[in-house]
Image (cartoon, rainbow, N blue to C red):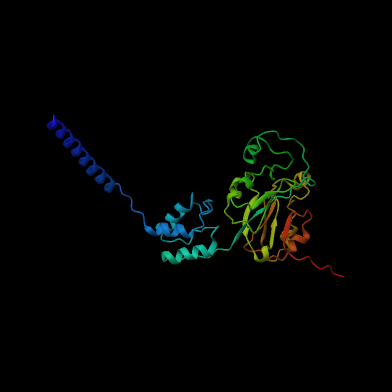
C-alpha cells in the first residue's frame, strides 16, 4: 500500500515538475519586454484617457512616445506643451511646441433667428437624428441641439444654453477633440486660442445659396464676399457658398466683422469699439 502511495506521489510530483518546466519555457518563449520608460512617461501624462492624442488611452500613447523615434507630430492636448517638453526631456527627444487650441461652435441658430418648422420625436441624439431627420428647422446644416457634444466632453467644458446651442467654457476646454468628433453636423472646430481668448470666425456652416440660407436662419452666411474684399491679409475664402476665416493668416483686425450684413462673423472678448464723433 505504501509503495503504491509513494509511486502515486512520485508520479504527481514528476508531472508537477514537468508542468512547471513547460510553463517556464512557454513564459520565456512568449515574454514581451516592456520598456520601463513607458511607465515613467505614463506617470507624466494627465491620465485623462480622452483620446485627444489619437491613442485609445494614456498607456497606449506612452508606449507610442517611447517607441517612436520622431515624436514631433505627437501631442497630448490635455497636458499641453509643458507636459510634452517634460516627456521629451525624459526620452532625450525633441518636440515642437504647438499653439493652444480651443473648441468653437460655428452655429448661431438661436430660436429667434432660426424658427422651428417641424417637431422631432425620435431618440434624443444628434447622431441618430442626423441620420433619419433633417432637423426641426429649415437649416439642414446647423446644430440639432441634443447635446451629444456635452455627453462626449470629459472636462465639463461645454453645455447647452437656453436656446439649445452648445457653449464652450474656454477655461475648461482642453482641445481634446471629443466634441468635434461627436458632432454629426461638423459645427464644432478647434481653432488657436489667442491671447485673452480673442477669436474671430464665421459662425455658420450653411452651404445653401444666399436666399435659402437667409430664409432658414437670419444669421447665416450668404457668401456676399464683403468680408473677402476688406481683409488685408487674404485670410478669408468662400467655398460652396460659405465664407471661412483661416486663423493662420487672420490678424484679428475685425474689418470683416464690421461689413458682414448678417452678423455671421463672430468676435469674442474684444473691447467695445469707440464710436467716432
Does residue 175 sit above or below 232 in this rendering?
A: above
Count numbered badges in the picture: 0
Residue 34 x/y as whole percent? 36, 54
Furthest toward the bottom, the residue is 277
Furthest toward the left, the residue is 3
Q: Is residue 24 left or right of residue 134?
A: left
Quadrant of the rendered structure where residue 38 is?
bottom left
The answer to which of 138 and 86 lies nearer the viewer is: 86
Quadrant of image for the N terminus: top left
Furthest toward the top, the residue is 1
Residue 150 x/y as whole percent? 64, 47
The answer to which of 172 and 64 lies nearer the viewer is: 172
The answer to which of 133 and 195 lies nearer the viewer is: 195
Residue 180 x/y as whole percent? 60, 49
Residue appearing at x 49%, y 65% in the figure: 85
Residue 247 x/y as whole percent? 64, 61
Residue appearing at x 44%, y 56% in the figure: 62
Q: Is residue 271 left or right of residue 156?
A: right
Q: Is residue 193 left or right of residue 14?
A: right
The answer to which of 17 and 179 lies nearer the viewer is: 17
Furthest toward the right, the residue is 277
Quadrant of image for the C terminus: bottom right
Does residue 243 sit above or below 111 in this rendering?
A: below
Amino acid at each position: 500500500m505504501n509503495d503504491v502511495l509513494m509511486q502515486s506521489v512520485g508520479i504527481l510530483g514528476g508531472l508537477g515538475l514537468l508542468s512547471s518546466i513547460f510553463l517556464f519555457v512557454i513564459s520565456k518563449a512568449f515574454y514581451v519586454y516592456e520598456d520601463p520608460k513607458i511607465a515613467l512617461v505614463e506617470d507624466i501624462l494627465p491620465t485623462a484617457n480622452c483620446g485627444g492624442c489619437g491613442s485609445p488611452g494614456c498607456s497606449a500613447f506612452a508606449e507610442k512616445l517611447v517607441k517612436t523615434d520622431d515624436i514631433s507630430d505627437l501631442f497630448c492636448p490635455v497636458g499641453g506643451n509643458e507636459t510634452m517638453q517634460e516627456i521629451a526631456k525624459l526620452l532625450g527627444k525633441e518636440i515642437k511646441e504647438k499653439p493652444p487650441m480651443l473648441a468653437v461652435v460655428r452655429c448661431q441658430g438661436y430660436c429667434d433667428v432660426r424658427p422651428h418648422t417641424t417637431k422631432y420625436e425620435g431618440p434624443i441624439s444628434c447622431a441618430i437624428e442626423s441620420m433619419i431627420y433633417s432637423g426641426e428647422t429649415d437649416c439642414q446644416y446647423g446644430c440639432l441641439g441634443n447635446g451629444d457634444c456635452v455627453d462626449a466632453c470629459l472636462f465639463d467644458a461645454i453645455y447647452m444654453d437656453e436656446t439649445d446651442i452648445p457653449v464652450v467654457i474656454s477655461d475648461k476646454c482642453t482641445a481634446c477633440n471629443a466634441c468635434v468628433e461627436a458632432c454629426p453636423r461638423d459645427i464644432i472646430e478647434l481653432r488657436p486660442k489667442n491671447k485673452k481668448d480673442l477669436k474671430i470666425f464665421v459662425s455658420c456652416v450653411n452651404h445653401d445659396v444666399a436666399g435659402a440660407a437667409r430664409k432658414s436662419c437670419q444669421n447665416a452666411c450668404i457668401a456676399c464676399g464683403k468680408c473677402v474684399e476688406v481683409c488685408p491679409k487674404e485670410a478669408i475664402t468662400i467655398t460652396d457658398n460659405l465664407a471661412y476665416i483661416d486663423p493662420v493668416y487672420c490678424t484679428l483686425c475685425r474689418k470683416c466683422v464690421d461689413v458682414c450684413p448678417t452678423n455671421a462673423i463672430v468676435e469674442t472678448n474684444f473691447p467695445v469699439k469707440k464710436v467716432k464723433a
